[in-house]
Amino acid sequence: MKYLLMIYSAPGAFDALSEEDRAAFSADAGRHSEELAASGELVGGAALADVENSKTVRVRGGVPATTDGPFAEAKEQLAGYYMVDCEGIERATEIAAKDPAARFWAVEVRPIMDEVGMEM
């Protein structure tokens, strides 16, 4: 089953880490990705650009409205994501717990529905 693991952090949180912590985090994140790729569980993923570069689109009454920034007012924003294909939610949660981002911020684990959504 596929799961989307979403990393949430406050804007500037990575930059607020010490140089040593940033280096350690980056090394740990690289190892984590390599382990998932080697196990065949990593489907893909990416870091996201800063929220100041984002737009949100809402259509109400057939009229689109575009605003700057992320879709919600929140302290933490979606900073990156990756998809895994693994045995179940327990394994996906275990993978998220090994992500170095979970030590500093939050990693949400959400099942991805297939075309018909039968697993929900």
Image (cartoon, rainbow, N blue to C red):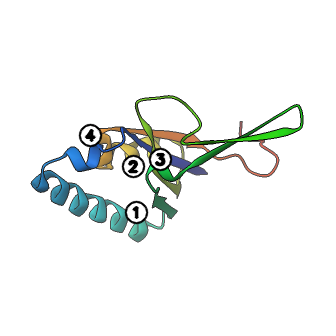
Instruction: Name the mark nearer the viewer: 4 or 3.
Output: 3
Q: Label 1 vs label 2: CA separation?
A: 8 Å
Q: Amino acid at mark 3?
A: Val
Q: Residues within 10 Å of mark 1 (few under 14, many from 20)?
A: some
Towards the viewer: 32 or 16: 16
Amino acid type, residue under disc 1 in the picture: Leu
Residue at screen point 60% across, 47% down: 55
Residue that badge 2 annotates:
95
What secondary structure is found at the residue carrying circle 2?
Answer: helix
Residue behind mark 1: 36
Q: Nearer the viewer, mark 3 or mark 1?
A: 3
Q: Are marks 1 and 2 in contact (CB under 8 Å)?
A: yes
Upstream in the sequence, badge 4 or badge 3? 3
Numbered badge on residue 51: 3
- Mark sitting on residue 104: 4
Left or right of 117 in this view: 62: right
Separation (CA) of disc 1 from disc 4: 20 Å
Cα distance between the residues tagged 3 and 1: 27 Å
Q: Left or right? Give the position of 54 relative to 101.
A: right
Depth order, front residue of 110/89: 110
